[in-house]
């Protein structure tokens, strides 16, 4: 009878366990497609953080080409003619009657610019200060503030959307400028915004002067880069399709700061506790409702609605709900041309 060999207890069991683990790790690495170098060590690589879509960079010392955006022209709007018509009874052959017959007011906006215009993640409702403007105009036409069909537009294509009739009007933090007035018409201003800078705490960025040599994110076709370029000529720029992409890039370390108007920056800062608005105002811009040329009756109608909502307290109620984080506010002054 042949005796079975004895297996020693104690240390040999631990050695067997280590061996099994080593085999398991080796097999696991092989299954994951990880190879080893000649000395048995896994290779070291650095993964490149992906960029949001449609991002462009300009690494020149002076940033993007200068833009002729300005307000050195007559930015007054059309004076309303008489009282507002009764909702649901628009003047014959007017732009408002066409909208009434269609049954919906088509509005171009951005659903990612909290607190101006965004979609509530819980209810799915479109909300914000800009959205309230659209509701007021819908209520004046239909007697119902919710007869609105929202279309997503970007800073780059919102004027085109008006010109080709995709939307009836644009309410998207759009500043009234001379160059835009050459292509479209505007209502009286409904909000005066101040441009500032958003940066992370402890980065050393406290003012526009600190942006020299830094990469700054701006939205495509916005007016924000021009003032920064004048005050910090060595700043570099990254241009994105949306402000949400700017935040993603700052979180990934691909840009050092964001510059835009205070309502937009406040909405971005609310999403990241380490971000804060810094520096003095770089200038003020008036937001207006954009309308395609050839519809002066609609511009006059919108102005009458905005006047009414200033007078009845609706403007202040909307400001207190959405923009009170900016401090006390009041409607901007305006002028009419006959």
Image: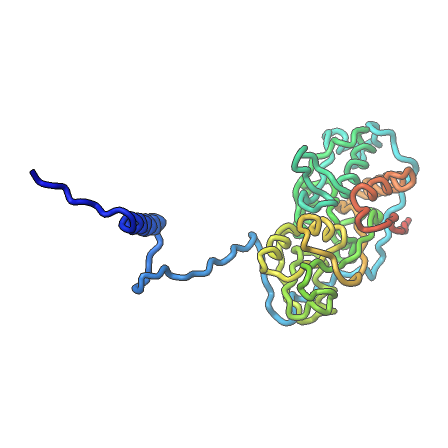
What residue is shown at x 74% (from left), y 35% (from top)? Answer: 105
Say which of 257 and 73 sits in front.
257
Place of residue 92 in the rendered image (x, y in percent of width and height, measured from the top left): 82, 31
Residue 182 falls in image quadrant: bottom right
| Displayed quadrant of residue 260 | bottom right
**Residue 274 visible in the picture:** yes
Measured from the top left, where is residue 189 in percent x and y?
Answer: 83, 49
| Residue at x 75%, y 33% (from the top left corner) | 99
Visual colour scheme: rainbow
Residue 43: % across, % down: 38, 61
Q: What residue is at 82 percent from the left and 49 percent from the top?
A: 191
The answer to whether 10 appears left or right of 201 in the picture is: left
Residue 22, placed above or below residue 106: below
Residue 307 position within the rendered picture, expressed as x and y whole percent measured from the top left = 89, 42
Q: Name the quadrant of the N terminus.
A: top left
> In the image, is residue 172 above or below residue 143?
below
Q: Residue at x 72, y 43 (%)?
A: 117
Q: Is residue 30 visible?
A: no
**Count of labels in the image:** 0
* 94 horizontally vs 7: left or right: right
Foreground pick, 201 / 67: 201
Say above or below: 3 vs 65: above
């Amino acid at each position: 009878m042949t005796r079975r060999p004895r297996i020693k207890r104690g240390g040999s069991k631990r050695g067997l366990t280590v061996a099994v683990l080593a085999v398991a790790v080796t097999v696991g690495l092989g299954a994951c497609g990880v190879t080893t170098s000649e000395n048995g060590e896994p290779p070291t690589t650095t993964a490149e953080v992906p960029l949001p879509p449609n991002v462009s960079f300009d690494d020149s010392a002076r940033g993007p080409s200068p833009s002729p955006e300005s307000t050195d022209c007559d930015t007054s709007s059309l004076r309303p003619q008489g009282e507002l018509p009764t909702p649901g009874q628009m003047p014959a052959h007017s732009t408002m009657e066409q909208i009434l017959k269609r049954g919906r007011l088509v509005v171009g906006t951005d659903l990612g610019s909290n607190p101006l215009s965004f979609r509530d993640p819980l209810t799915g409702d479109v909300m914000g200060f800009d959205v309230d403007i659209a509701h007021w105009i819908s209520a004046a036409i239909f007697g119902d503030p919710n007869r609105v069909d929202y279309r997503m537009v970007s800073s780059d294509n919102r004027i085109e959307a008006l010109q080709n009739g995709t939307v009836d009007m644009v309410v998207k933090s759009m500043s009234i400028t001379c160059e835009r007035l050459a292509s479209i018409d505007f209502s009286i201003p409904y909000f005066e915004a101040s441009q500032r800078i958003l940066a992370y705490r402890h980065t050393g960025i406290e003012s526009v002067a600190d942006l020299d040599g830094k990469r700054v994110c701006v939205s495509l076709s916005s007016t924000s880069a021009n003032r920064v370029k004048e005050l910090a000529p060595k700043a570099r720029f990254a241009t994105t399709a949306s402000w949400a992409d700017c935040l993603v890039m700052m979180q990934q370390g691909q840009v050092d700061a964001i510059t835009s108007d205070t309502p937009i920056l406040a909405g971005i800062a609310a999403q990241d506790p380490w971000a804060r608005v810094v520096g003095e105002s770089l200038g003020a811009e008036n937001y207006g409702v954009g309308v395609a040329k050839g519809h002066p009756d609609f511009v006059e109608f919108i102005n009458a609605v905005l006047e009414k909502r200033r007078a009845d307290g609706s403007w202040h109620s909307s400001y207190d709900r959405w923009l009170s984080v900016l401090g006390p506010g009041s409607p901007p002054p305006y002028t009419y041309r006959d």
